Image (cartoon, rainbow, N blue to C red):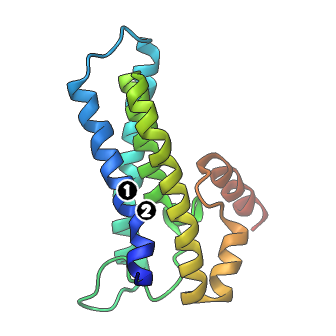
Amino acid sequence: MKQWTKDRFLYYIAGVLLVLAYSLLWFLDTPAGVQLLRYIGGGILVVGLILIILPRFVFRSKGKPEKGKDWTETTIVVDTGIYAVVRHPLYLGWLLMYVALILLSQHWLTAIIGIPGIACVYLISGQEDQRLIEKFGDDYKHYMQKVPRMNLLVGIIQLVRRRDRG
């Protein structure tokens, strides 16, 4: 199996699981549930969508992709904007979509589908770190030391501390 195909396998699984979890939200009878959890899920959904959309704008303006190339094909390590807070905002947004769907539906089947989806997205982010180390070398390793992979709260705290020092 080609390396690209092996690397993309988790993308396919995570994508199918997300679509399935979203479909269940509409087709399953939801239990009475806790309304507060649904509100929290809605908030997480909004944050997740923002984290999925932001990278496109940051990469196009700061990543210097070659003309005609995909917006993800940056030529430099982007460490500003949302990328000063978390290394993989797109994957964090994707992961948060699973959490939001679980909280919104509050159905056991959505949780059973969502948990492996979350694991796939986390593994994908690790693969992406390895790919970026190969592409950017020490620059990316230094960036990894400064910015957490997907912990938004820790990333915000570290960013504030870096700005207070500098």
> Along the horizontal axis of the image, is 164 left or right of 81?
right
Identity of the residue drawn at 43% across and 62% down? 10
Location of mark 1 (residue): 13
Q: Is residue 78 above or below residue 107?
A: below
Q: Is residue 79 above or below residue 152?
A: below
Q: Residue at x 54, y 80 (%)?
A: 131
User: For this view, does 138 lie left or right of residue 101?
Assistant: right
CB under 8 Å between callouts 1 and 2? yes
Q: Quadrant of the C terminus?
A: bottom right
Residue 11 x/y as whole percent: 38, 62
The residue that appears at 45% across and 89% down in the rendered structure is 75
Q: Which residue is mark 2?
A: 10
Residue 21 in which image quadrant: top left
Q: Quadrant of residue 57?
A: bottom left
- Of 142 and 32, which appears nearest the observer? 32
Position in image of residue 118 (x %, y %): 49, 47
Q: Amino acid at mark 2?
A: Leu
SS for tag 1? helix
Residue 76 drawn at (x, y percent):
50, 86
Q: Please tell me which residue lies in front, 145 or 27.
A: 27
Residue type at mark 1? Ile
- The residue located at (46%, 43%) in the rendering is 96
Do we see residue 44 in this rendering?
no
- Tell me if I can see residue 144 in this picture: yes
